[in-house]
Image (cartoon, coloured by chain):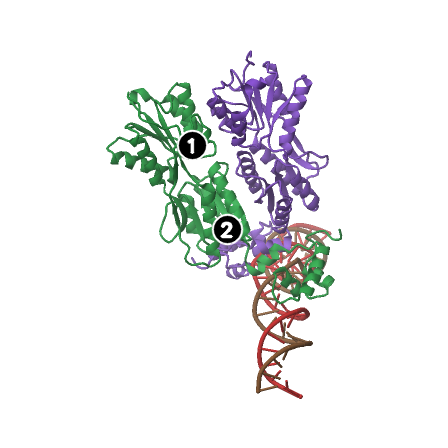
Chain colours: A green, B purple, C brown, D red
Amino acid sequence: MSAKPGKSNIYDVAKLAGVSHQTVSRVINTHPSVRPETRQRVLDAMAELEFVPNQAARTLVTSKTNLIGILAADTTLYGPAGGVNAMEIEARRAGYATLTCSINPSSEAEIRGGIERLRRLGVEGVIVITTHNRPAIVAREVLTDIPVVAIDAEYSPGELSVDVDNLDAASRATQHLISFGHRKILHITGPSASFVANQRRAGFVATMRRNRLKPLIAQGDWSIEAGYNIGRDFDFDGSGVTAVFTANDSVALGLLKACRERSIAVPTRLSVVGFDDIPEAGYFDPPLTTMRQEFRAIGHEAMSMLLRTLAGEREVESEFLKLDFMVRESTGPAPLL
Amino acid sequence: MSAKPGKSNIYDVAKLAGVSHQTVSRVINTHPSVRPETRQRVLDAMAELEFVPNQAARTLVTSKTNLIGILAADTTLYGPAGGVNAMEIEARRAGYATLTCSINPSSEAEIRGGIERLRRLGVEGVIVITTHNRPAIVAREVLTDIPVVAIDAEYSPGELSVDVDNLDAASRATQHLISFGHRKILHITGPSASFVANQRRAGFVATMRRNRLKPLIAQGDWSIEAGYNIGRDFDFDGSGVTAVFTANDSVALGLLKACRERSIAVPTRLSVVGFDDIPEAGYFDPPLTTMRQEFRAIGHEAMSMLLRTLAGEREVESEFLKLDFMVRESTGPAPLL
DNA sequence: CGCGCTAATGTGACCGCTCACATGCAGTGC
DNA sequence: GCACTGCATGTGAGCGGTCACATTAGCGCG
């Protein structure tokens, strides 16, 4: 009731409690050598004055901001959104706040701008979550004095990163289709500038080649529309394609709609494999066979690595995760054409 | 190459440029009365030392943090994620950074903890985006000295908020079904603690009553699973229900799957109306008739209101938005049972 | 030619906190 | 009984900026 919060400082509290400002500081920082009785007196004074420690002043002297930057591409997508959320919660547990900066990962200017922005804000570490390589590379190049953890970027020894084995996952997805007897398989890719998309594509191509099959490629961009448009226009009969592996679940959703419109039965005539296992995937028509990504776990792990590094831990190791394959009803034996 | 960034201060720069620290400060703040030649000399020195202004020091003296807090419920969901993203971009344009704090809106402790956390971080204003009322109420109660903008909370005169006319929207959705001849309509609600969910429910109930029809209610919680479970277990034949209005699109997705499994034809036997128009909605089977929410626009508007208030503008007015109805293929004339 | 005025720059205090160090006072050992 | 230790507390400096004000130079003008 008395004073407006944020208006009183440790000297006001000290005076009211009848101690020195240093003792107040000790109470704030839960220093051991303060008599319980004294501590209580200070706490009471703080409560009465609605004292809120001035973060800027602490930061100024300790040069600890307790801020972690997150450089992210589209945080609207399910994957990044979950990851960022998990990071925030994990950071909070360690007393850190997160500052998210969204950028277009294809724009060098935005990448540099975002990094510069985070740096000026004084972040103690940065997590880069994009499916592109470039942001992580630039961040590491520019931010030489603070730790950088990359998610879904090309692994390089000595750097901190949480990576998913997209090559292996795409390979397994492809193999799944091949073992069902499919021979002509189409892959609808993600954007060509995306590292992750390229890994998935490479896994697909390599597996097809290994089986002496010709990899068929259609260029997509992660979007539902891309899946729909390709599904609507592609000549399945002429090409003899009996299965499609899409770069993500959204693309698969668009593709499934096109199939419905063209009366292409899934999986009887066409098998479809997605990637991500978004919450909706199991409710598609038919329920989608897909590679499951644990986005929250990935975000959590990345933040944990960063926090450990910040805490001075030496032996922090990069992670390389394998994915679970969710076999549902959108895939089946190849039809006899 | 020379010094580590963040290591030099204005005095170092001043010395190197042969000016006083105050002149350096003037250059940082683009003060008019600095000779172009002097300015350039200072800029060169800053570049050479890789000088980065210390945000904490500026904040300490100006008591301007340039930070805006966002108190959000589940930022993983499509709606909030889009809104928060739009807010961040809008804030950045005005030189502000956003600090997102995720909470469980049903926990009083988490609400208070989140608010206290933002306050300690020194935010200059807060946007509350939850579908619950409580967080906004508590935020306004506690944060008396900074502006608070609420999204999707009960409107109260004199307070800043961006609201969607859920009552009207639910009413129109219901009316749409009624005008198709449906008489027995089921509403699957959102969580009972959610203000928004209750508004939608109230709009449904009022419209049914106005048409002398009995409102049928099933309790949901926004989730796909809720829609699926209710769709799987509900006795459509016994009850004679021919249409369902769901609290959001996810619930509708679950319901549609259940219908498929039970061979309940949509819209021939059962019409379904959703709410939100998530990107996937038009790709459901069948494409979903739903109320469209412009989440990004809502976030943008809320941030704009907050920024205007922070800039000292007096006449900032709350918004009350009407929604567009997207009629697609999941609704049709009531069947003759 | 000296007055006032403005543009460009410099000086020192201070924002609120923590740090290193100083002090006071009990308890301990010989 | 006295130096020695260690706990509880106090003192003053300084983190890196900005603010208010002081100072200097340059110029028009009566």
Identify the residue under disc 2: A119
Q: Position of residue A263 (x, y in %)?
A: 39, 18
Q: Do we see residue A91 in this rendering? A: yes
Q: Which mark is residue A91?
A: none
Q: Name the chain under label 2.
A: A
Mark 1 neighbour class, 10 Å CA radius: few under 14, some 14 to 19, many 20 or more: many
Q: Is residue A242 left or right of residue B102?
A: left
Residue at the right extreme, as displayed: A2
The quarter holding residue B168 reads top right
- Residue under the image location 57 percent in, 33 percent down: B221
- Tell me the kind of residue under disc 1: Asp
Q: Secondary structure at mark 1?
A: helix
- Residue under the image location 58 percent in, 35 percent down: B300
The quarter holding residue B311 reads top right
Q: Do we see residue B249 in this rendering? A: no
Q: Position of residue A234 (x, y in %)?
A: 35, 23
**D22 vs A2: above or below:** below
**A160 vs A203: above or below:** below
Q: Is residue A287 left or right of residue A242?
A: right
Report the mark closest to the observer, 2 or 1: 1
- Tell me the kind of residue under disc 2: Arg
The quarter holding residue B316 reads top right
Q: Position of residue A262 (x, y in %)?
A: 39, 18
Mark 2 neighbour class, 10 Å CA radius: few under 14, some 14 to 19, many 20 or more: many
Q: Where does the C terminus of chain A fall, quadrant-wise?
A: top left
Q: Position of residue A19 (x, y in %)?
A: 70, 66
Identify the residue under disc 1: A249
- Residue under the image location 28 percent in, 36 percent down: A207
Q: Name the chain under label 1.
A: A
Q: Secondary structure at mark 2?
A: helix
N-terminal of the pair, mark 2 or mark 1, is: 2
